[in-house]
Image (spheres, rainbow, N blue to C red):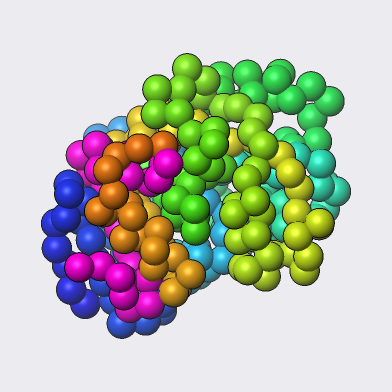
Amino acid sequence: MSTKKENNIEVKIYGSRKDMGCAAAERFAREIDRLLLEKQEINVVFAAAPSQNEFLEYLSDHNLPWSRINAFHMDEYIGLPADAPQGFGNFLKDRLFARFNFKSVHYLNGNAVNLEDECRRYSDLISQYPIDIVCMGIGENGHLAFNDPPVADFEDPMMVKVVELDLACRNQQVNDGCFSHLYEVPVSALTLTIPTLLGAGFISSVVPGNTKAQAVANTLEKEISTSYPSTILRNHTNVELFLDFESSQLLK
């Protein structure tokens, strides 16, 4: 493992996805323990993606007080069948939410009759439970949650919004094995906005794999711009970036 501070981000590089996920889970557990010395309950936003599999798996190694944690997720497809395994709520329910006894779990509903009302409902929940920790990835196109370059807004007035997914984002879902064909991937989604995500006190970003190497390099080296949404992480004071060898290959 190697670690370095680069452009305000703590970058940690591991030899394998397994080691990366194990370290991210251990760091998450330490942050939970620290926060629970200060408050009775804490609020965490989780990402749903294959890039998070190792991190989510290794959380079971830690005897965490899940009954003091309120859980959220950062995005959801619009229009998938309610039981679709690709649904982000379903993904996290299978790998996390149903495994532990959380104080509460709050799902985004991509099949709500009125999507604007659903955005307001979830925004109200986040206002009620201000985010302490965000556990995120970074997309191949640099997106954070579903804030793709065409819709990313670093000063977004919304907390949660409806977005159209760009082609690179939709192709990633096929590359990740979540869908067999591009035409199966929904064209729109609900997402927490960038200011909402950056409102967390601590951000853990777990980004493995060679398909993410360019996005990782862009995050750390490109000018901060919505053309590369993840570059905004450099403006946060408490971000740790967990990489494996493959995703770190293009770093200088």
Name above or below for residue 163 compared with residue 25. Answer: above
Q: Is residue 201 visible?
A: yes
Closer to us: 183 or 57? 183
Q: Is residue 97 visible?
A: no
At 42% from the left edge and 41% from the top edge, which residue is drawn? 227
Closer to us: 70 or 84? 84
Q: Quadrant of the image for the N terminus?
A: bottom left
At 67% from the left edge and 70% from the top edge, which residue is drawn? 177
Q: Residue furthest bottom?
A: 15
In the rendered structure, which segment of residues is drawn in magenta? 227-252
Closer to us: 252 or 57? 252
Counting from the top left corner in percent of width and height, residue 209 is at 45, 73
Name above or below for residue 153 compared with residue 76. Answer: above
Counting from the top left corner in percent of width and height, residue 252 is at 20, 68
Name above or below for residue 79 compared with residue 9. Answer: above
Counting from the top left corner in percent of width and height, residue 190 is at 65, 35
234 in magenta: yes
At 27% from the left edge and 43% from the top edge, which residue is drawn? 223
At 65% from the left edge and 60% from the top edge, which residue is drawn? 171
Counting from the top left corner in percent of width and height, residue 165 is at 65, 43
241 in magenta: yes
Q: How many marks?
A: 0
Which image quarter: residue 114? top right
